[in-house]
Amino acid sequence: MGALRGMLGSKHETIDAHLHITDFLQDTDGLDKCIKYMDKAKIKHAVIFGLPVSKLWAEWEKQPPGYYLGDNSKCYYYSAVDFIVAHEFSALSKEKQQRFWPLIGGFNATDKFGYKHIERMIKYHPGIWHGVGEILFRHDDLTNLTYGDPPRSNHPGMDNVYAMCAELNMPICIHQNITSVGTSSYPQWLHELDETCQNHPRTTIVWAHAGVSRRVYSPIYYQVVKRALESYDNLYVDLSWVVFDDFVAPGGVPDENWLKFAEEFSERLCIGSDVVRKFQQLPYTMQRYDVFLDSLSEKARKDIAFDTAHKLYGKVVA
């Protein structure tokens, strides 16, 4: 019965604000299959992107990796991912295209020429883009597994990108952990997010997973996120992936502090599946939010399930 219930999807109409249509090998099963499982999950729209890095099959590995943690080989930046996203989107009928809101993300975040990739994608595939992201900055083991300098949200290579996003009114979704894995709960990288928001107040920034990855921990994490939203009017948060399972509703039980926080900041919170290509996981992944959404007021529930994401991503900007 539990497995059956997991396939029924959410009881609420939602927008999936965080969906990867390619995996770390840059493979995809296509958006027609995605729509099939979106319907099962009761997802009306999905904010879609690929992954800006691709996993290397190293010469010393006999078996190909299937994930960035599959072995110790490196990842490298893969700009063609945005052409894959654009191709998959453009192959759909106009009616089906309305279900998806694509973002641009296939550039090296430490390259001061990164903004040129965004310009090219807008030039060669105009009229389909709803924002930029997910840009991978501080990200558990992936940071050290990626060739080049460690990306961070306040890297000088991003200044022109943020400026372009502000000029075009494009939201940008960023993955910026507050600290590294295996360290104390001290938020050693939170100042990087602070500097980003302070230096680019006109840029709408969506903080993916509220700065959490695997093995990133703080005993008062909701206070960290609350302080950030109180400090920066241009900052929004998506509650996808492990921040929900580890903090918002650990063990499937909503945390009272997070419920109060969600009521106060519902207009700046959204949810997403963070599914990576495996679209069959969408119904279960979105259904697990129900215990949290059901504990909120009607307004907060509608904001977080639908309205905030619609406000952020609901129009074509380039």
Image (cartoon, rainbow, N blue to C red):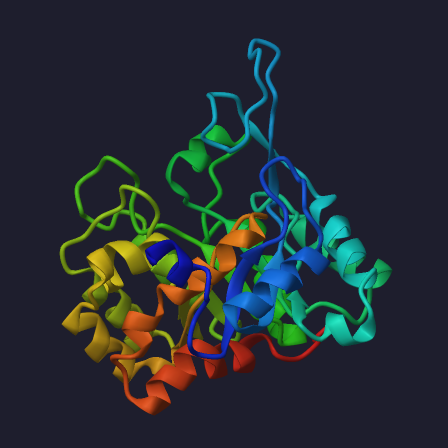
Which residue is most to the right? 124
Residue 114 is left or right of residue 221, and the answer is right
Residue 153 is left or right of residue 108, and the answer is left
In this orientation, does residue 176 appear? yes
Q: Is residue 215 above or below residue 171?
A: above
The residue positioned 35% from the left and 68% from the top of the image is: 289
Task: Residue 122: name its quadrant.
Answer: bottom right
Q: 316 or 281, which is in the foreground?
A: 281
The N terminus sits in image quarter: bottom left
Q: 278 or 70, which is in the foreground?
A: 278
Which x, y percent locates residue 179?
Answer: 29, 46
Which x, y percent locates residue 50?
Answer: 63, 50
The residue positioned 17% from the left and 41% from the top of the image is: 184
Q: Is residue 49 above or below residue 182?
A: below
Which x, y percent locates residue 134?
Answer: 54, 55
The residue positioned 60% from the left and 39% from the top of the image is: 53
The residue positioned 57% from the left and 47% from the top of the image is: 109
Which residue is most to the front? 1
Q: Is residue 174 above or below residue 142?
A: below
Residue 31 is left or right of residue 198, and the answer is right
Task: Residue 207: name its quadrant.
Answer: bottom left
Which x, y percent locates residue 5?
Answer: 39, 63
In this orientation, does residue 208 appear? no
Tell me how many marks there are.
0
The C terminus sits in image quarter: bottom right
Q: Is residue 57 above or below residue 89?
A: above
